[in-house]
Image: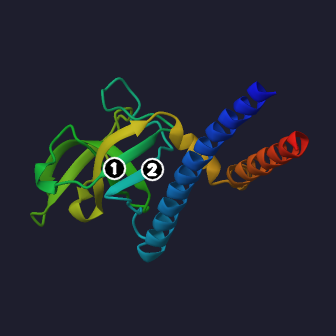
Amino acid sequence: MEEKTRKMGVFRRIFFIVGIVLIVLFGTMLVCNLILIVKGFIEPEKPPALFGIVLMAVKSGSMSGDAKDHIELDDLIFIGKADEESLKAGDVIAYLGEDRTVVTHRIVSIERDEAGQTVFITKGDANNTTDAPVERSALIGVYRGRIPKLGGFVMLLQTPVGTALSVGVPILLFFATDLIFRKRKKKAE
């Protein structure tokens, strides 16, 4: 009996620690999401950044390939603030396209337009043609890295089913574990 009580105590401590870690993790995610939502309302014309990093889910395969900095469909990518003066051919940048969608392509050259302004000529690694010249004002930032396939998961969470699962599953787990502990406590008494 004493061994069983000791095991239950260890199990409770482990569960408590895991619970605290999950609360901190979900709490941090909630605060970050609220910051992004508020920034999105304040500046709806550009993607919101968190600590200087813009997170985006990739919706096309235009940067697929073998390059060390390739980007695949459904990746979650990180775009950091760009020092426009240090950008060069070969860098991957994100910018607002003509239809106000975000495009992430590689710089193939940097030129001057008719007015003498610097423009970036970009092209997707998997595309055959270059894009329209990108003005500095359209620049969002420079590519910093990616997490493969996590963008697809993030996009799923933005659907009604994904939102219901991301909110409902943790609540159900909380109630289920609480119910189990209450039954075990009652049984032990």
Name the disc covering residue 56, or none.
2
162 to the left or right of 76: right
Residue in the image at 71% along x and 29% along y: 7
Q: Position of residue 174 (x, y in %)?
A: 74, 50
| Image quarter in which the C terminus is found | top right
When the figure is inspected, residue 154 is found, relative to residue 2, above or below; the finding is below
Are discs 1 and 2 less than 8 Å apart at CB?
A: yes
When the figure is inspected, residue 15 is found, relative to residue 119, above or below; the finding is above
Other residues around mark 2 within 10 Å, as few (<14) / some (14–19) / many (≥20) = many
Separation of residues labelled 1 and 2 (CA atoms):
8 Å
Q: Position of residue 34 (x, y in %)?
A: 51, 66
Q: Position of residue 29 (x, y in %)?
A: 52, 55
Residue in the image at 46% along x and 66% along y: 35
Q: Which element type, helix, strand or loop, lies under badge 1?
A: strand
Q: Position of residue 126 (x, y in %)?
A: 38, 32
Q: Quadrant of residue 50?
A: bottom left
Q: Which element type, helix, strand or loop, lies under badge 2?
A: strand
Q: Residue furthest right?
A: 187
Q: Amino acid at mark 2?
A: Met
Name the disc covering residue 79, or none.
1
